[in-house]
Image (cartoon, rainbow, N blue to C red):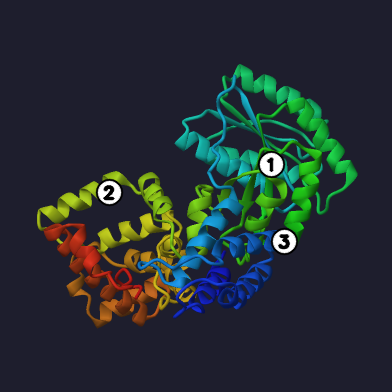
């Protein structure tokens, strides 16, 4: 989401190379570059002005320490101000109340409220161990009610029936009663959206809010909406007592301005960020980690948390035991690793959270390491016989031709996969002998995981 902004901010910091200290003269052009980068990213003009002024006040006259270059000193200041702009601290949902705790989602049509409701239900069930019920009061769009019912089944949440002929306020009354009888911990309310803010919509949603008495009222906003996101956030903030924001579609081509503007304009914390279409693609928002991502420093803490939550520990343990016994890393093992990587959004999603060196082409990685690329590799392995997966060395030219045809790929793709497997097999041997140190040694200096260099 912040690729272009990250690159522009890095270029701005590099322009200070060779300076002994940060002065008004030598940071004037740099701050102009930062201002342009933020405006191009669709950050609201008042937010840009106050942000630049705070950086100027902190930067001018600051001595550069022995361990820091002027560029690094400026990046440190920008990081601190980004953290402040994004909310300083993460704000988790408050569950200290008598259940059912009601969470209401509001926002414009197309922002992703219905999908976010299901993603949030899944997250609360798995990470907070809550019993969750979903209900839709979007009587203007019957398809939304059916969509929420389908998604509730997918994520294992309860669903309160509703109909387009009902009054939204009556649906809320029934949903609260049903949630209480079913001993539900959290009731998530998906409200109606509109293509634009209008008075009728605001009156309806205010009536629903009054009846629901939600503990959390979250404004769902599309990251790609740009300035429209700021305008909508302002209107909803005036009509409802918002308690937080959910940014959706952050994995798209968004410039990132919404993330930097909405928090400042509404004064409400960003609670979650949607990073993909899968039901598990909803991350808790951490201002300090997001600021690091924007500045190209990575977000290793979130990556570690994802690994703990999404990696199949049984399969990982079995592979470790297998390697300890001296048995080789075969193509079935590679398929397991690829599938687990896909569960985490693909290698590209993981690399976004790592502090990659400037020479690494992020766009090329996205193309080579996305879900589609991994699916093609899994298809090639599935096209093999059990013996070929177990003993890759028996795969000759005629076998490669058959495997490629069965997977709908080219022979070059099969060769590439076999080369990747050979590299990973060597890496796994190093791991079994010397642990993670030996594996990481091969990735130092910007080296990519095998097959993606």
- Cα gap from disc 2 to disc 3, whole angstroms: 47 Å
Pick the front one: 316 or 107 = 107
The residue that disc 2 covers is: 315
Asked whether the residues under the numbered discs 2 and 3 touch, taking CB atoms below 8 Å apart as contact, a structural biologist would say: no
Q: Earlier in the sequence, mark 1 or mark 3?
A: 3
Sequence-first disc among 1 and 2: 1
Q: Could you say which quadrant of the image residue 180 lies in?
A: top right
The Cα atoms of the two marked residues, 1 and 3, are separated by 37 Å
Q: Quadrant of residue 373?
A: bottom left
Sooner in the amino-acid sequence: mark 2 or mark 3: 3
Q: Which residue is mark 1?
A: 146
- Residue 40 in the image: x percent, y percent? 67, 71
Instruction: Identify the residue shown where x is 77% and y is 51%.
Output: 232
Residue 148 against residue 168 in the figure, above or below: below
> Do callouts 1 and 2 mark residues in contact (Cβ within 8 Å)?
no
How crowded pointer 3 is (Cα within 10 Å; few <14, some 14-19, many 20+) is rated as many
In this image, 400 relative to 394: left or right? Answer: right
Kindly tell me whether residue 199 is visible in this rendering: yes
Nearer to the camera, 146 or 225: 225
Q: Mark 1 Cα within 10 Å, few/some/many (few <14, many 20+)? A: some
Residue picked out by circle 3: 44
Q: Position of residue 146 (x, y in %)?
A: 69, 41
Q: Position of residue 159 (x, y in %)?
A: 63, 32
């Amino acid at each position: 989401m912040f690729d272009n902004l990250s690159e522009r901010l890095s270029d701005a910091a590099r322009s200070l190379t060779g300076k002994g200290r940060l002065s008004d003269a030598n940071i004037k052009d740099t701050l102009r570059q930062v201002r342009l980068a933020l405006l191009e990213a669709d950050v609201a003009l008042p937010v840009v002005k106050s942000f630049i002024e705070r950086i100027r006040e902190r930067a001018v006259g600051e001595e550069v320490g022995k361990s820091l270059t002027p560029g690094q000193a400026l990046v440190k200041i920008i990081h601190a101000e980004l953290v402040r702009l994004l909310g300083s601290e993460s704000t988790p949902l408050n569950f200290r109340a008598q259940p059912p705790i009601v969470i209401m989602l509001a926002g414009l049509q197309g922002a992703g409220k219905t999908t976010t409701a299901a993603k949030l239900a899944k997250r609360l069930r798995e990470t907070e161990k809550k019993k969750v019920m979903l209900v839709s009061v979007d009587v203007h769009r019957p398809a939304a009610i059916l969509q929420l019912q389908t998604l509730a089944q997918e994520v294992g949440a309860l669903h309160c029936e509703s109909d387009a002929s009902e009054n939204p306020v009556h649906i809320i009354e029934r949903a609260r009663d049903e949630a209480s009888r079913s001993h539900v911990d959290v009731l998530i309310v998906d409200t109606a959206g509109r293509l634009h803010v209008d008075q009728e919509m605001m009156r309806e949603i205010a009536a629903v809010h009054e009846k629901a008495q939600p503990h959390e009222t979250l404004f769902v906003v599309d990251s790609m909406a740009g300035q429209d996101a700021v305008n909508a956030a302002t209107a909803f903030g005036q009509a409802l007592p918002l308690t937080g924001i959910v940014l959706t579609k952050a994995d798209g081509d968004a410039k990132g301005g919404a993330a930097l503007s909405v928090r400042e304009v509404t004064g409400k914390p960003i609670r979650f960020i949607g990073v993909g279409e899968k039901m598990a693609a909803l991350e808790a928002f951490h201002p300090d980690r997001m600021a690091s991502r924007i500045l190209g420093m990575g977000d290793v803490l979130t990556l570690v948390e994802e690994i703990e939550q999404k990696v199949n520990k049984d399969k990982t343990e079995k592979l470790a035991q297998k390697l300890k016994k001296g048995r080789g890393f075969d193509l079935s093992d590679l398929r397991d690793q690829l599938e687990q990587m896909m569960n985490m959004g693909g290698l590209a999603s993981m690399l976004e959270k790592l502090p990659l060196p400037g020479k690494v082409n992020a766009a090329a990685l996205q193309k080579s390491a996305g879900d589609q690329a991994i699916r093609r590799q899994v298809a090639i392995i599935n096209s093999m016989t059990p013996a070929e997966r177990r003993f890759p060395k028996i795969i000759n030219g005629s076998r490669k031709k058959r495997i490629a045809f069965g997977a709908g790929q080219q022979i070059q793709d099969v060769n590439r996969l076999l080369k990747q497997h050979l590299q990973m097999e060597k890496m796994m041997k190093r791991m079994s002998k010397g642990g993670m140190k030996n594996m990481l040694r091969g990735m130092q200096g910007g080296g990519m995981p095998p097959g993606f260099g």
